Amino acid sequence: MGYELLRTVVWAVAATMLIVGPVTGQMNDDAEAGSEQAESAPADEQSGGQVIEGLVLNYYGGGITGARIRVEALNAKPGDPPIAEGESGKGGEIRIRLPKRVNENVRVRIQMDGYQEFVQEVDPTDPENPAFVDAALQGAGTISGVVRARSSGKPVANARVLGESGGRETAARTDAKGKYTLTGIVRGKARLKVVADGFATFRTILEIDEQDAEEDIDLSAELPVELLVVTSDGDPAEKVLIEGWIESTRSSVEAMSDANGRATLRGIGEEVDEIRLRLNGDRYVRMAGFDERLYLTASQPAAETMPATTRPALHRIIVNIAAKVRGRITDDKDEPLAGVRVSAGRKSRSDMPVTWTDLDGEYQLSGLPAGLIPLTFQHPDHAPDVREVSLNAGQTGTLDARLNAGEAIAGTVVGPDDEPIEQAWVVLEEWKGYQTIGMRAATDEEGGFLFKHAPEGELIFTIVKAGSSRPIRQTMVAGKTDYRIVLEEVATPAVAGGGPGPTGVKIPVGQTVPDFTLIGLDGTKYKLSELKGKYVFLDFWASWCPPCQKEIPNVKALYEAMKSESGFVLIGVSLDTENKDFKEAVSQKKMDWPQVWGPESGAEETFEMLDGLGIPYTCLIGPDGRMLAQHIFGPGTTEQVKKLVKN
């Protein structure tokens, strides 16, 4: 969990942490006043005993403040006084000095309301390896109840009950009486899902405000949806993965078509009247979004028994046979180039088909539609290129490319006072009519920027300094390295809405942002018009986007700094197309702030309205609904946002 790095951070800030006395929990003034001198003295000359350090974290890796820390002897009995005690700091840090040196292991006990007690034995006797406590707390609450069939009231045995609470998933099976118990639940929102053969999948969101909660569940009979998947020629389409998204319940279903093109979507209740479908397979045109709509007939009879016996109507779905393209990418010496990013499409989108060349410089892209397809080739040490290839359905086309080093583009960004502007963003918007090349750079402390490998021809860039300038468009050409670009300061329009923004900027700074709605994973609706009076920071990202991953620590630092501010809302908006990729990234990166993902969540629509070009994209919207800043990146993110919020 990266605790060695966290331990280093804790040691670096240890001198500023609270040092706790032996039993009472009062500050040890002598130790605090002489901490600098004591830390540099030999252990046997220090006043007091050894120091125990550590971190108290929740499931996401966020620090837990105010957890009660108790250090006790291994043979301590209930009621015995502790050796020392205290509380975790603002970031979950632990630093407790023992009142005297000990020569044996001790037990550290950590307690926090709503969490299970944590106990760890540590060895404080080794001066080469100071005692460190790694405490990841789990919820202490439970959700229990009985699962019954709605039609008969009888208990449903062996139903699978799934819960998600505080970022942690837990599961249980109902017994013969339909009873279940989920453990490890933390206070706050908990998602509950129940799956049982013959029944519609049940989902709900609970607000857990007590240690234990009870939730009885009535399951309705399912109405299976029968599908026939065929090609545009009417032939059965085999091995098509059919994924369905049900907006009314914010849930998904899936099935695979058989040799006859038949498939059945299970667990769907009678209240569902529409499903959005995504169909994919090796032979078929790739669908990244849930673009196919399936309307269920209102005449389907409701099932009153378990399991459902009524066969619903057969729904016919058409898929298109796809084309493929393969090729080999070399450098100007005809040597193969590995790691070239190959993408298909005329404009950058989060769902565009992408692959990379292998060690032999070879690539293959499948699932492409028939027609004229632009392919973009990008490599960090070469100028990017775009080529087009004409493909027929079922065909495997060939397109090779040779990338050269290109020439440099460089310059300086300054303000009206001719002073250099640091951390201004220079972003390539368009080249030869294509919007697929992700060249971007931030200016250094001298206002300088550099692109080492630019293609020939005119390149149209947007230059902006978040929060302090209006974006401008600048045409540049490879080989010119003395550009001097002057950014004008932001002038907030006197009238809400302002005038038309600069070319290529959808919503300039100072203009009112149109209303939008984002739906979080827990079902919370973030409607901009209902957030008036608050600052709203949006971070658009995806798991497949390396620059987005690089920015996560900066967004995390902003969240930690502002999460206690009631007038500030930070929302992560993922443009991932796969739920598993999104959830894995959130878990691994410990993104402990509200997240939006999924079809009908408003993620794609809001991104297209605000920017629509490339990610990462961030923006800060003011309490009056006007755009305050865009493209806020880098280690100075927190400082920039605090300055804007303060003003």
Image: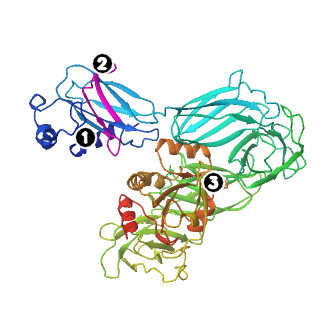
> Mark 1 vs mark 3: which is more N-terminal?
1
Q: Which of marks 1 and 3 is in front?
A: 1
Q: In which quarter of the image is the N terminus?
A: top left
Image point (51%, 45%), residue name: 586
Residue 349: % across, % down: 60, 60
Residue 41 appears in the rendering: yes
Q: Relative to residue 459, is residue 327 drawn left or right?
A: right
Dot 2 falls on a residue whose secondary structure is: loop
Question: Circle 2 is placed at which residue position?
Answer: 76
User: What amino acid is at disc 3?
Assistant: Pro
Few, some or many C-alpha atoms within 10 Å of disc 2 (few <14, some 14-19, many ≥20)?
A: few
Dot 3 falls on a residue whose secondary structure is: loop
Q: In this view, does 327 lie above or below 163?
A: below
Image point (29%, 21%), residue name: 80
Is label 1 in contact with label 3 (beta carbons under 8 Å)? Answer: no
Residue placed furthest toward the top: 75
**Residue range highlighted in magenta:** 68-93
Q: In this view, does 94 lie above or below 417?
A: above
Question: Circle 3 is placed at which residue position?
Answer: 353
User: What amino acid is at disc 1?
Assistant: Trp
Image point (75%, 39%), residue name: 255
Measured in 3D between alpha carbons, the distance from the residue under mark 2 to the one under mark 1, in whole angstroms, is 29 Å
Instruction: Judge whether residue 95 is colored magenta.
Output: no
Measured in 3D between alpha carbons, the distance from the residue under mark 1 to the one under mark 3, in whole angstroms, is 46 Å
Q: Please identify the quarter of the rendering in which residue 34 is found.
A: top left
Q: Is residue 509 above or below residue 553?
A: below
Few, some or many C-alpha atoms within 10 Å of disc 1 (few <14, some 14-19, many ≥20)?
A: some
Q: Please identify the quarter of the rendering in which residue 265 is found.
A: top right
Residue 166: % across, % down: 51, 40
